[in-house]
């Protein structure tokens, strides 16, 4: 299978492109294990784009091989790249990829036009109830609202 995934002109150009984009030293791969290990060890965390991208790339190359073999269509690098981008875009739009999958690879996220927004972290503060001072009345209220303008409150 090396000829499908690593040795033809289409696959070589695709691996070179993504290795350069991700800052990975590209070496000629001969097995699926080599490519997955190289990319996986470069990833800062589990489920990172550097672990996802080679799997999707292998899948797109396999699809292209089948299209070529069974439909008599020539290998087309633009079609393979478009398929990879389409899969990653779908994962982003369906929120199956989050900020963590792109950590440290914002240039790659830009290429895929991914909205990478780090969740805001507000400092925690301890809040507790104190009784009112003598002679005063205390009124407790609570309220909330959504981004769609829905609101509620309790008095």
Image (spheres, rainbow, N blue to C red):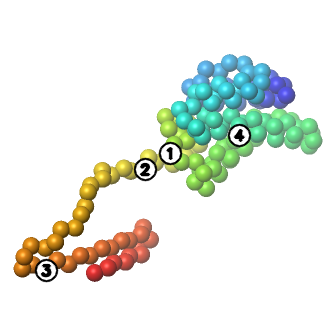
Quadrant of the rendering where the N terminus is positioned: top right
Position of 53 compared to 65: left or right? left
Mark pair 4, 3: CA separation: 64 Å
**Contact (Cβ within 8 Å) of mark 4 with mark 2:** no
Farthest residue toward the left? Answer: 135
| Residue at 80%, 23% in the rendered image | 7
Residue at which label 4 appears: 56
Which of the two discs, 4 and 2, sits closer to the camera? 2
Q: SS of the residue at dot 1?
A: helix
Dot 3 or dot 1, earlier in sequence: 1
Q: Residue 55 location in percent, x, y?
A: 71, 37
| Residue highlighted by disc 1 | 99
Q: Which of 64 and 146 is in front in this view?
A: 146
* Viewer-side label of 3, 2: 3
Q: Is label 4 in a helix, a strand or a loop?
A: helix
Per the image, the residue denoted by label 2 is: 119
Q: How far apart are marks 1 and 4 (CA)?
A: 19 Å
Using the numbered discs, state the Cα–Cα distance from disc 3 to disc 1 in whole angstroms.
Answer: 47 Å
């Amino acid at each position: 299978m090396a000829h499908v995934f690593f040795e033809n002109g289409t696959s070589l150009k695709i691996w070179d492109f993504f290795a350069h984009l991700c800052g990975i030293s590209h070496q000629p791969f001969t097995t699926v294990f080599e490519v997955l290990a190289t990319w996986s060890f470069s990833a800062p965390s589990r489920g990172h784009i550097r672990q996802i991208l080679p799997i999707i790339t292998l899948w797109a190359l396999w699809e292209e091989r089948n299209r070529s073999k069974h439909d008599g269509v020539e290998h087309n690098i633009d079609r393979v790249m478009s398929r990879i981008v389409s899969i990653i875009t779908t994962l982003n739009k369906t929120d199956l990829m989050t900020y963590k999958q792109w950590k440290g690879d914002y240039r790659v996220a830009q290429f895929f036009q991914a909205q990478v927004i780090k969740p805001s972290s507000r400092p925690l503060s301890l809040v507790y109830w104190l009784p009112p001072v003598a002679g005063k009345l205390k009124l407790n209220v609570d309220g909330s609202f959504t981004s769609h303008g829905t609101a509620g409150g309790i008095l």
